[in-house]
Amino acid sequence: MLTHSLRRSALPLILLPALVLLAGCGDEPAATAKPAPFASTYKPLPSKPTLLRNATVLIGNGQQLDNASVLLQDGKIVAVGSDVKAPDGADIIDASGKWVTPGIIDVHSHLGVYPSPALTASEDGNEMVAPDTAYAWAEHAVWPQDPQFPLALAGGVTSMQILPGSANLFGGRSVTLKNVPARTVQQMKFPGAPYGLKMACGENPKRVYGEKGGPMTRMGNVAGYRKSWIEAAKYLKDWKAYEDALAAAEGNEAAVADKMPQRDLRLETLAGVLKGEILVQNHCYRADEMAVMIDIAKEFGFKITAFHHAVEAYKVADLLAENNICAAVWADWWGFKQEAYDMTLENAAFVDKARATVTVDGKEQQRVGCAIIHSDSALGIQRLNQEAAKAMVAGRRAGIDISEAQAMRWLTENAAKALGIADKVGTLEQGKMADVVLWDRSPFSVYAHAEKVFIDGALMYDRNNKQQQAATDFELGIVKPEGERL
C-alpha cells in the first residue's frame, strides 16, 4: 500500500511525473499519487479528416517532396507522400502551387508575460529582485487573452516557449504552450513538454545588480552560478538521503521525520536540472562566455540545451556541435548593446554546417550543428518564416549550400529538439501531432502568407475566412490596437 508519507515527499512531487501506484493488498483500492501542480489541461479541438494534396511539402527534417499530399486525421499526421488517399468524409484541399510545412515553433517568446497593450501593470516577465530567482515560474504570469497570440498564429506559429526575463543569472522556469485560445494557462500547456530553466550571461545581470550587491562583473556572474549549483547539489543529496532512509524505514515517515529536508522552490528547479528533467535555456551572446557556461555545466553534471541570442555562436559552432547544444539566433538583429556587436549575417548558416566527432562509449559519433531562428519579439514572431529566409540567403551568399528544406529545420525540427518535444512535433511524420501550416507560396518568399493553420488537426486559422480568425476584445474597438503588429 502506498503510504501517506511517500505521497507527501515534496521533492518527488515536483520532479517526478505523476505516478500511479497499485495497492499492495488485494482488498484495498489503488492509490494515486498527487498530480504535479499546474498540470496541463490542454485538449485538442474537434477536427475533421483533412487531405492537403498536390503541394510542395517540407517535412521539417531537411526533406522536400514535390506534388505530394499530407493527411491529417484524429489530430495526427497519418500519411505523407505522393499516393495518399482521403478517407470517407474528409475535407480535400487542392494545394497546387502551395506549400505545406510543420507548424512553426518559437523557442524564445514573452507573449503573455509582456502582453499588449504594454502597460506597467501587466508586465510580468522579469522578476528583478535577486540574481537567482529560479523559484519563479513564467506560467504564473501568462495572460492567455494576450491579443499577440492570434497574431503569432496568423504567422504560422503553433507552439512557443514562454520565458521569464533575462535580468538574472537564474530567471526562473519557462513553459511551452500550444497557440490556442484558452481561459487558463493550463489549457494552453503543451502536454508532456518539459520545463526549461532560463539562465542569462553577460551584460544583463551585471547591469541590473552591479550596484545592488552584485554581480558586478562577469567573474561575479560565474561565481553566482557556481554558488547556486553547489547549493542545488547538496539539496539533491539531502533529499536522496531522506528517501533512502524512508525506504529503509519501510515508509514510516514518523521514524525519519527529523531527516526530511526543508522544501525550497528555488533549489527544486535547479535540482530538476541536475536530474535531467528541466532543460537549460541559456541567454548568452559572446562565444567565450558560452565556452565558460559549458565548463560550468560539466563541473556540475548537467547539460545546456540551447544558447539563446547567440550572436557569436559562429565562433564556437564546432564546440556547440561537439556538446550537442543548439544555438537560437536572430537573422540580423544586432548592435543594441556591446555584447551584440560582433555579429555576422551568416551566423545560423555557420552553426548549421558545423560538424564534430566525439567518442561515446568507445565509439566515434558524428554530431551536427543545431541552428534555430527565434524571435524574442512580439513583431518578429509574426514573420519568423521571413527571418529564416534572410538567414538562409545570407548563408548562400557566403557559398554555403542551404536548401529551403534544410532552413525549415531552423523553425521546426531543431526548435522542437531544443524544447524536448521533438517526438511530438517539428516534422511531418506519421503519428506526430497534426500541427501544420498551408502557405500560399514558398514560406521563404517575402510575399508568403500562412493561408491555413492546423493545431492537432483542427483548423485554427484561415486567412480567407473571417470566421476562422480569432478575435480578442482588443480587436473590437474598445482599445485601438497599435504598435505590436505588421
Image (spheres, helix red, strand yellow):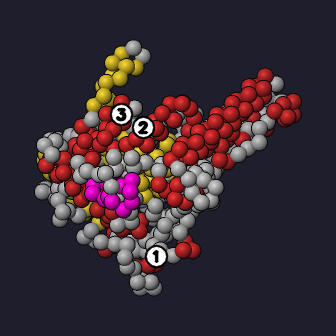
Name the residue: 72% across, 32% down: 238
Quadrant showing the N terminus: top right
Residue for badge 2: 291
Give the crowd class for mark 1: few <14, some 14-19, many >=20 residues within 10 Å. Answer: some
Up-down: is 298 above or below 185?
above
Given contact means CB atoms under 8 Å apart, are the residues at marks 3 and 1 in contact?
Answer: no
Q: Give me the C-alpha separation between circle 1 and circle 2.
A: 38 Å
Give the crowd class for mark 2: few <14, some 14-19, many >=20 residues within 10 Å. Answer: some
Farthest bottom residue? 477
Name the residue: 52% across, 59% down: 207
Amino acid bearing label 2: Ala
Amino acid bearing label 3: Leu
Identify the mark nearer the N-term, 1 or 2: 1
Residue 470 is covered by the magenta coloring: no
Up-down: is 162 above or below 14?
below
Q: Where is residue 332 in the image (x, y as percent from the top left)?
A: 27, 57
Residue 335 is covered by the magenta coloring: yes
Foreground residue among 28 and 62 = 62
Q: Give me the C-alpha separation between circle 3 and circle 1.
A: 41 Å
Residue for badge 3: 319
Residue for badge 1: 117
Up-down: is 74 above or below 229?
below
Instruction: Give the SS element for disc 1.
Output: loop
Name the residue: 25% across, 70% down: 464
Q: Where is residue 466 in the image (x, y as percent from the top left)?
A: 31, 74
Span colored in magenta: 329-340
Q: Which mark is residue 392?
A: none
